[in-house]
Amino acid sequence: MRKISIFTLGLLVVLGGCRAAKVTKVCAPILAANSVVVELPHDGNGGVHQRVISNLTQIERLTEFANARRKVWQWKSRKTPAPEITAYFYENGAYLGGIGSGKDFLYASGPEWSGIRDAKAWEIRQFKELVGVK
């Protein structure tokens, strides 16, 4: 009986520790962006392709998408995976926040917090469409 109690206690400690290692927060909303810099996948030489979105209608749609997905998490003990495509929002050159996509996750960042969230395939497709990637 004593072995079961020690095993159970050990399991609770391990599971509790795993849960505590993941921190969830909500990034600040993106407001009044007037430009978006999109970073696309690296080329074969290790370079990054960038393009700027200045169309306010496109920025507004992308902002709505990002603001609906601000709740993200990060591991305390592991590095957050890097997104493949990222859109950074600016207002007159001042950084407001960003959103990006990986294979099966979305990345969100703000001036004080960044993290990831699980994403459905349709969310990633929608994000890519919004930033002009096929």
Image (cartoon, rainbow, N blue to C red):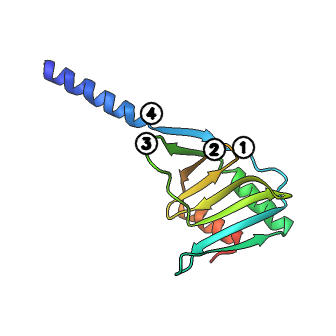
> Which residue has dot 1 on it?
28
Q: At numbered mark 2, what does the secondary structure look like: helix, strand or loop? A: loop
Query: Residue 101 lies in what quarter of the image?
Result: bottom right
Q: CA distance from mark 1 to mark 2?
A: 8 Å
Q: Residue flagged by tag 1: what amino acid is it?
A: Ala
Q: Are marks 4 and 1 in contact (CB under 8 Å)?
A: no
Q: Which residue is mark 2?
A: 113
Q: Are marks 1 and 2 in contact (CB under 8 Å)?
A: yes
Q: Nearer the viewer, mark 4 or mark 3?
A: 3
> Given the current orientation, which residue lies at the most extreme bottom position?
44
Indicate the amino acid at tag 2.
Answer: Trp
Q: Nearer the viewer, mark 4 or mark 2?
A: 2
Query: In the picture provided, is 23 more to the left or to the right than 5?
Result: right
Residue found at x 81% / y 60%: 60
SS of the residue under disc 1: loop
Disc 2/disc 3 C-alpha distance (Å): 16 Å
Q: Earlier in the sequence, mark 4 or mark 2?
A: 4
> Which badge, 4 or 1, is on the more N-terminal residue?
4
Q: Amino acid at mark 3?
A: Ser
| Residue at left offset 76%, top offset 64% | 36
Q: Nearer the viewer, mark 1 or mark 2?
A: 2
Quadrant of residue 12 within the rendered picture: top left
The reply to whether callout 2 and callout 3 are in contact (CB within 8 Å) is no
Local packing at callout 3 (Cα closer than 10 Å; few below 14, some 14-19, many 20+) is few
CA gap, disc 4 and disc 2? 18 Å
User: Which residue bears the numbered disc 3?
Assistant: 77
Left or right of 78? Residue 59 is: right
Q: Which residue is mark 4?
A: 20
The amino acid on which the numbered mark 4 sits, given as a three-letter code, is Ala
Measure how far apart labels 4 and 1 are at the Cα level. Answer: 23 Å
Q: Residue furthest top?
A: 2
Q: Around disc 4, counting alpha carbons within 10 Å, would you say few (fewer than 14), some (14 to 19), or many (20 or more)? A: few
